[in-house]
Image (spheres, rainbow, N blue to C red):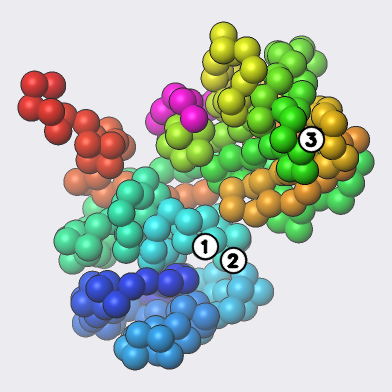
Amino acid sequence: MKVAVFGTLVSTDFIPVLDEFFQFLKKNKIEVQLFKPFCDFLVDELNTTPYYASLFNSFADFDNDNSFIFSVGGDGTFLHSVLNIRNFNIPVIGVNSGRLGFLADISADQINDALTNILNHKYTTVERSLLQVDFVGCKNMEFNYALNEITVSKTDTSSMINISVFVGSELLNNYWADGLIVSTPTGSTAYSLSVGGPILTPDSENFVITPLAPHNLTVRPIVVPDKYEITLKVKGRGTHFLTSLDFRSEAVEQATIIKVKKAGFKLKTLQLPEQPFFNTLRNKLMWGIDKRN
């Protein structure tokens, strides 16, 4: 078996977990292709030597024969792995080196058990929808897909912006707000959740449209089927507005129309026996910590 390992930064406290992780792979004779910038960081900054057989720098030299991709870090690192690797046939597995993580959901104390289950094929595959975002009137981003969400927001003025949202050919609403989020089910536990959006299960076939600080307090988040294309038209006092796809942001001219639809492919992730989605929710959001519930 051959696997890829991706990462960006981890703390020195995580070195024992990394050692356990790489030792397991080595002991079981699993070939490792390691992300070179992460390897350089581990060697130069943390003075630790990881186990690997080969290196890769980007999707251009990534080995498509890998069985799995391990993303070591938090949810942000997971999103970076999608951008840097861009192979949607190989499942991505998140190893959490931080705190709260819905995508990087294997905690430090679960490493050995999780890897054992994966090696023994004790898991189910969960496919996650992505957004395809097209700019009409200007050049698209180099990789115009998002796993979590697209956000439009004000940029060069303190005034609110007006966002006309069409679901299919029908006008949903003209939002006066600081911005607006269109998220996937995966993104429903990210930015959208922090501004009051609902939580969707990963297999939901929906989008969530969530306004940011709307002027009209009766305006609420709404869930719509992902079979529709969503069109965003922005007006405001400034000349540009900010568009963000997951962690990548770009200022675009107000004449730009944004079209959002479900991508023609999905990202594969793994669900281990001890980590069903609702269990993850309870643990990450500390539901039930009040013993009266």
Task: Please check the rendered image and state whether residue 31 is part of the magenta-colored stretch, yes or no.
Answer: no
Which is closer to the viewer, label 3 or label 2? 3
* Residue 68 visible to an observer of this rendering: no
Q: Is residue 243 left or right of residue 90?
A: right
Within the image, what quadrant is residue 215 found in? top right
Q: Which residue is mark 2?
A: 84
Q: Which residues are magenta?
A: 195-206
Task: Please count the marks in the image.
Answer: 3
- Picture residue at 59% right of the left edge, 28% below the top: 212
136, 24: nearer the viewer = 136
Q: Which mark is residue 81?
A: 1
**Discs 2, 1 touching: Cβ within 8 Å:** yes
Which amino acid, mark 1? Answer: Ser
- Picture residue at 66% right of the left edge, 46% below the top: 244
Spot occupied by residue 55 in the image (x, y as percentages of width and height): 51, 84
* Residue 233 visible to an observer of this rendering: yes
> Which mark sits nearer the N-terminus, 3 or 2?
2
How far apart marks 2 and 1 lie (CA) works out to 5 Å
Q: Relative to residue 77, is residue 210 depicted above or below?
A: above
Q: Secondary structure at mark 2?
A: helix
Q: Mark 3, residues whose alpha carbon is within 10 Å: few (<14), some, or many (≥20)?
A: many
Spot occupied by residue 262 in the image (x, y as percentages of width and height): 65, 35
212, 233: nearer the viewer = 212
Q: Which mark is residue 258?
A: 3
How far apart marks 1 and 3 lie (CA) works out to 25 Å
Question: Which residue ends up furthest to the left in the rendered image?
Answer: 291
Within the image, what quadrant is residue 240 found in? top right
